[in-house]
Image (spheres, rainbow, N blue to C red):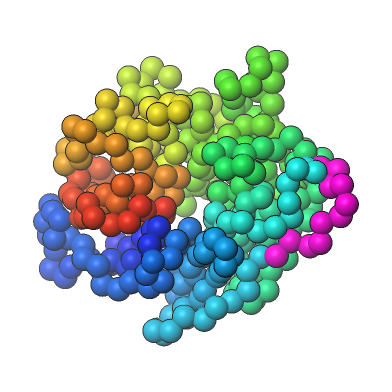
């Protein structure tokens, strides 16, 4: 169980500390804000590196560009480090002539394997994946993915350009990495990024013409997560439903079609020790993007997607318009503690797997990302 949680918000990074002496069900006194950094600046993503304890924070400063900072374990000061940079754009990019080769957002950060000291991955808008071998002091565009012929068909899902928001590094093999792209499907490498193949077979995009609904290259996986003890099991909250893979992303099966709660949403979290258990936050599709009936709930499956429970205890059930972004739901490494942050600055925690929720705050800035660690 982690004693720290991180919030990336529209107005800075907030570090929460679990209050000492907590007992199960201690409510909104379970967490308190212990520190804040970059107050007033949008924090789009953060990463607590489990290998050396470093903390990375990505900022989007608009006119002043994207920034990236690192704080070493035990240190109090932040160091500004390099940001991913695209190479010069050739005249008339044949793949996506309408997309500028310019970094506009860091949407995902992931640590490499424990056998790859210093390796980091970054997913960006406009759809580029970057790798660092030196803890972010320099970055290289993964050209093999950037140059796949299929990139010409990627398009924006919410943003004007495609973006990589999910990076799953196989804990058994650091060279095996799967990424999720809106809207570009899922792609996988088994050689550390030297070559890539589409990995979204089975997903279906009902927003496309019928003859193209099954096309792997235009799917919109809103978020993909991987089970820590069973890395072949991945869960996906897609624009058009919930999907699960039990073969490392080679094939996906839709889940919850008989679920009475909407299967549209953005966030998903998987139990780190139980691949059958996952959580989702349903919303009203498509343009509305608010909780169903203005009542916030979390959907949980504990049988691999055969059935889902609607968890509402402690969550606002009237006049609630909080949306949970892709990275706004997190589960601790014990599989029991969860935290969820919303676009309206609401923050809730659970210490019983989501059966009941406690309000931590309703006055935070809009929350982009939540992590334990």
Q: Is residue 308 above or below residue 196?
A: above
**Left or right placement of residue 277 versus residue 89 in this view:** left
Q: Is residue 86 magenta?
A: yes
Q: Is residue 83 above or below residue 100?
A: below
Q: Is residue 348 magenta?
A: no
**Left or right placement of residue 301 versus residue 257 in this view:** left
**Residue 287, located in which quarter of the rendered image?**
top left
Q: Nearer the viewer, residue 212 or 170?
A: 212
Q: Nearer the viewer, residue 86 or 139?
A: 86
Which quarter of the figure is the N terminus placed in? bottom left
Residue 141 at x, y percent in the picture = 73, 61
Going 41% across and 71% down the picture, which residue do you hit?
38
Going 31% across and 47% down the picture, which residue do you hit?
344
Residue 11 at x, y percent in the picture = 38, 62
Residue 96 visible somewhere in the drawing: yes
**Left or right placement of residue 176 versus residue 373 in this view:** right
Give the magenta-colored segment's residue range: 85-95
Going 40% across and 29% down the picture, which residue do you hit?
288
Residue 182 at x, y percent in the picture = 60, 40
Q: Is residue 373 above or below residue 331?
A: below
Going 39% across and 58% down the picture, which residue do you hit?
9
Per the picture, the main secondary structure of the magenta-coloured stretch is loop
Which quarter of the figure is the C terminus placed in? bottom left
**Residue 106, located in which quarter of the rendered image?**
bottom right
**Residue 309, located in which quarter of the rendered image?**
top left
Residue 54 at x, y percent in the picture = 47, 75
**Left or right placement of residue 212 versus residue 68 in this view:** right
């Amino acid at each position: 169980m982690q004693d720290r949680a991180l919030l990336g918000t529209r107005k800075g990074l907030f570090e929460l500390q679990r209050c000492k002496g907590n007992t199960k069900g201690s409510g909104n006194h379970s967490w308190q804000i212990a520190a804040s950094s970059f107050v007033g600046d949008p924090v789009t993503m953060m990463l607590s590196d489990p290998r050396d304890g470093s903390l990375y924070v990505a900022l989007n400063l608009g006119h002043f560009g994207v920034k990236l900072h690192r704080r070493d374990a035990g240190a109090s000061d932040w160091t500004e480090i390099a940001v991913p940079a695209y190479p010069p754009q050739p005249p008339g990019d044949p793949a996506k002539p309408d997309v500028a080769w310019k970094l506009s957002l860091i949407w995902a950060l992931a640590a490499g394997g424990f056998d790859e000291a210093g390796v980091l991955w970054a997913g960006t808008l406009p759809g580029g994946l970057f790798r660092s071998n030196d803890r972010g002091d320099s970055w290289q565009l993964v050209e093999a993915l950037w140059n796949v012929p299929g990139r010409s068909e990627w398009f924006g899902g919410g943003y004007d350009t495609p973006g990589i928001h999910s990076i799953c590094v196989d804990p058994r093999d650091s060279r095996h990495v799967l990424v999720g792209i809106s809207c570009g499907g899922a792609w996988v490498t088994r050689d550390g990024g030297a070559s890539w193949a589409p990995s979204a077979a089975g997903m279906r995009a009902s927003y496309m013409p019928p003859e193209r609904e099954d096309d792997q290259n235009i799917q919109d996986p809103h978020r993909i997560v991987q089970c820590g003890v069973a890395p072949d099991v991945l869960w996906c909250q897609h624009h058009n439903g919930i999907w699960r893979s039990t073969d490392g992303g080679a094939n996906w099966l839709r889940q919850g079609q008989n679920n009475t709660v909407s299967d549209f949403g953005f966030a998903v979290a998987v139990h780190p020790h139980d691949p059958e258990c996952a959580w989702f936050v349903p919303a009203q599709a498509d343009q509305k993007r608010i909780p169903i009936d203005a009542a916030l709930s979390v959907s949980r499956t504990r049988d691999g997607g055969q059935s889902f429970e609607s968890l509402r205890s402690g969550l606002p059930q009237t006049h609630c318009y909080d949306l949970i972004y892709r990275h706004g739901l997190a589960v601790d490494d014990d599989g029991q503690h969860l935290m969820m942050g919303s676009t309206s600055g609401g923050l809730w925690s659970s210490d019983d797997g989501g059966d009941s929720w406690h309000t931590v705050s309703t006055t935070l800035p809009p929350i982009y990302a939540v992590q334990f660690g």
